[in-house]
């Protein structure tokens, strides 16, 4: 199996060389070129034909986001963005990037090497498997809110990873304020989850926020698990659904984990829940979704034809956890359909 051909686009000479040196240590990676700005990158793409490109957001002569918007329609390519803590990363994902990593604020070479080995390399390998044709704005059905007044007694739980920021948005933008309370795990570094929740809050009809222990799961509200070292659990206090966010070990390599959330929803809400698993690498959430289905919940999985990475939904489907398999554009309407039968 040939190595993954990688092009590095980074304006800092020091950081660029460190990326080259450390990525080349992995036999599965071949660094085929580097560029310090989008104009050099354009030429390098044509000359080197990379499988994956890493891209800094802040670049001279043209921003990484503008470059992506010009590049993707003409030369679709899996891109992993390297970003400082900024909501610009979501513009990059919207423009067609597969995923991103947070640029580390490191004080030693060993810390940087750990970042490259444990974060960037993983994202590059996942990106090399992504279906670039599915990284596009979905023409979703315009769903008219039509819930029959039971929202306060029900819960919607969503889990996603690679490609999930755009997939979640494409689903929840079609939810009205009558939708039951939504709890979400999207694999994302710390700091970015708060910005992503604000983005959803600003652009969707529902209210969205980064979750804190004690937040109530109310109709028309989305609670997003914070990135970092804590898991989010659904609990019920005095007859009201709430979330608890607490430290715990990684599950399936992730914290927060979709499985941890889904398992808690299965135990606490049982048949009063809907579980949705979206695009992502690996199997996080599959067993939890199966637990939800066994507890009487309705379960929905994104289909292969619309996933950026058909990993998590495939594992869930193969386990028998998915009751309804839908295109991304149909998940919102399916959500309302099953809720109205509950």
Image (cartoon, rainbow, N blue to C red):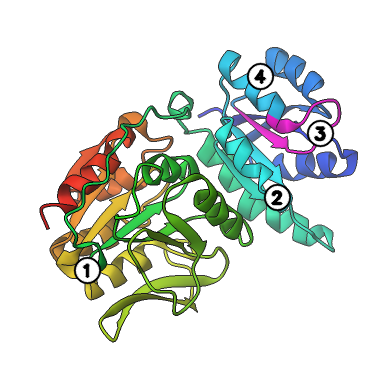
Q: Tag 1 or tag 4, which sits nearer the N-term?
A: 4
Question: Which residues lie in the magenta part?
Answer: 52-65
In front of the other: 254 or 166: 166
Q: Tag 1 or tag 2, which sits nearer the N-term?
A: 2
Q: Which residue is mark 3?
A: 59
Q: Foreground mark, 2 or 1?
A: 1
Measured as percent of width and height from the top left, residue 263 is found at: 29, 69
Q: Which residue is mark 2?
A: 86
Q: Foreground mark, 3 or 2?
A: 2
Residue sitting at the far right? 13
Is residue 57 rendered magenta in the image? yes
Q: Which residue is mark 1?
A: 153
Structural crowding at the residue carrying mark 2, measured as other residues with C-alpha within 10 Å and reported as few (<14), some (14–19) or many (≥20): few
Query: Which residue is rendered at x = 47% and y = 58% of the image?
Result: 208
Compute the Cα span from label 2 to label 4: 21 Å
Q: Callout 3: helix, strand or loop?
A: loop
Structural crowding at the residue carrying mark 1, measured as other residues with C-alpha within 10 Å and reported as few (<14), some (14–19) or many (≥20): some
Compute the Cα span from label 1 to label 3: 49 Å
Q: Which residue is mark 4?
A: 70
Tell me which corner region of the image, top left, top right, bottom left or bottom right, holds residue 27. Answer: top right
Measured as percent of width and height from the top left, residue 329 is found at: 32, 33
Query: Which residue is rendered at x = 51% and y = 45% of the image?
Result: 203
**Position of 317 relative to 188 (above/below):** above
Q: Tag 2 or tag 3, which sits nearer the N-term?
A: 3
């Amino acid at each position: 199996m040939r190595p993954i051909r990688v092009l590095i686009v980074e304006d800092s000479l020091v950081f660029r060389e460190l990326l080259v040196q450390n990525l080349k240590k992995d036999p599965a990676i071949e660094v085929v070129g580097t560029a310090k700005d989008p104009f050099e990158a354009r030429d390098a793409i044509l000359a080197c034909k990379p499988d994956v490109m890493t891209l800094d957001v802040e670049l001279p002569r043209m921003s990484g986001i503008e470059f992506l918007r010009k590049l993707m329609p003409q030369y679709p390519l899996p891109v992993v963005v390297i970003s400082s803590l900024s909501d610009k990363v979501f513009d990059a994902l919207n423009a067609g990037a597969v995923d991103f990593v947070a640029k580390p604020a490191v004080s030693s070479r060993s810390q940087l090497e750990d970042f490259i080995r444990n974060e960037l390399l993983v994202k590059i390998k996942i990106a090399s498997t992504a279906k670039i044709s599915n990284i596009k704005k979905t023409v979703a059905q315009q769903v008219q809110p039509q819930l029959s007044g039971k929202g306060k007694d029900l819960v919607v739980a969503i889990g996603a990873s690679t490609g999930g920021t755009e997939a979640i948005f494409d689903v929840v933008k079609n939810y009205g304020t009558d939708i039951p309370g939504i709890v979400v795990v999207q694999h994302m570094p710390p700091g970015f989850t708060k910005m992503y929740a604000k983005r959803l809050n600003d652009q969707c009809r529902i209210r969205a926020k980064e979750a804190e222990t004690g937040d109530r799961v109310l109709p028309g509200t989305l609670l997003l698990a914070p990135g970092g070292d804590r898991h989010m659990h659904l609990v019920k206090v005095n007859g009201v659904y709430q979330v608890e966010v607490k430290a715990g070990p990684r599950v399936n390599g992730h914290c927060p984990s979709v499985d941890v959330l889904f398992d808690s929803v299965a135990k606490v809400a049982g048949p009063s829940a809907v579980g949705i698993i979206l695009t992502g690498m690996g199997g996080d959430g599959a067993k939890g979704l199966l637990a939800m289905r066994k507890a009487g919940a309705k379960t929905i999985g994104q289909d292969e034809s619309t996933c950026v990475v058909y990993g998590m939904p495939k594992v869930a489907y193969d386990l028998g956890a998915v009751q309804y398999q839908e295109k991304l554009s149909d998940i919102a309407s399916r959500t309302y359909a099953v809720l109205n039968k509950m």
